[in-house]
Image (cartoon, rainbow, N blue to C red):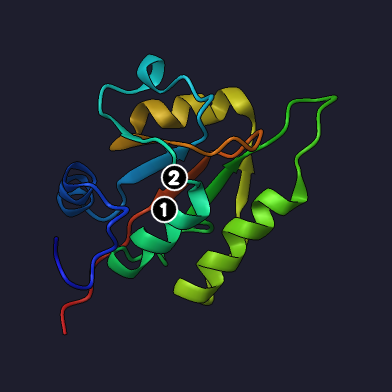
Amino acid sequence: MLQGISPLLSPELLAVLCRMGHGDEIVLSDAHFPAETFNSRVLRADGIRVPALLDAILPLFVLDPYVKSPVIMMEAVPGDTLDPEVGKAYREVIDRRRPGTPDFELMERFAFYERAKKAFAVVVTGETAKYGNIILKKGVTPID
């Protein structure tokens, strides 16, 4: 165990976050996401919901301020709907940990899959909410 680091973050996830460079992206996927189909670097965070994982990651992780939206969520397919509480729960954590972050971009399902192929890693969480997938783009880590 390390002080100041959430016990929700596995050693593998900490290593991935450390190895990511600015502009790299990480997908926090819901439990239904076909992660192994779209990315070769897949980590498991079974039983952990996305808001809790966001809360653990964001103290260690700067969101890219040089892009229109460093946070992307999967858009509902036509004829389906997003539960607004899902995005609201994610937004609450991001606003608390990284105030001033721009609005989320909503991305069409298959475009989201293509983006996941290029992501640094995919973390499969225990999130059961439909369309509970989110991408975070890492910024430059400030040096004090």
Tag count in the figure? 2
Q: Residue furthest top?
A: 37
> Can residue 131 be seen in this snapshot?
yes
Q: Residues within 10 Å of mark 2 (few under 14, many from 20)?
A: some
Left or right relative to 120: residue 102:
right
- Compared with 53, 122 (above or below) is above
Which x, y percent locates residue 106?
A: 64, 44
Q: Quadrant of residue 77?
A: top right
Q: Residue furthest bottom?
A: 144
The amino acid pointed to by label 1 is Leu
Measured Cα–Cα span from mark 1 to mark 2: 7 Å
Q: Which residue is mark 2?
A: 48
Quadrant containing the N terminus is: bottom left
Q: Residue at x 39, y 14 (%)?
A: 37
The amino acid pointed to by label 2 is Ile
Which x, y percent locates residue 29?
A: 47, 36
Q: Residue at x 35, y 30 (%)?
A: 118
Q: Are marks 1 and 2 in contact (CB under 8 Å)?
A: yes
Q: Which residue is mark 1?
A: 53
Quadrant containing the C terminus is: bottom left
Q: Residue at x 36, y 37 (%)?
A: 123
- Does label 1 or label 2 sit earlier along the sequence? 2
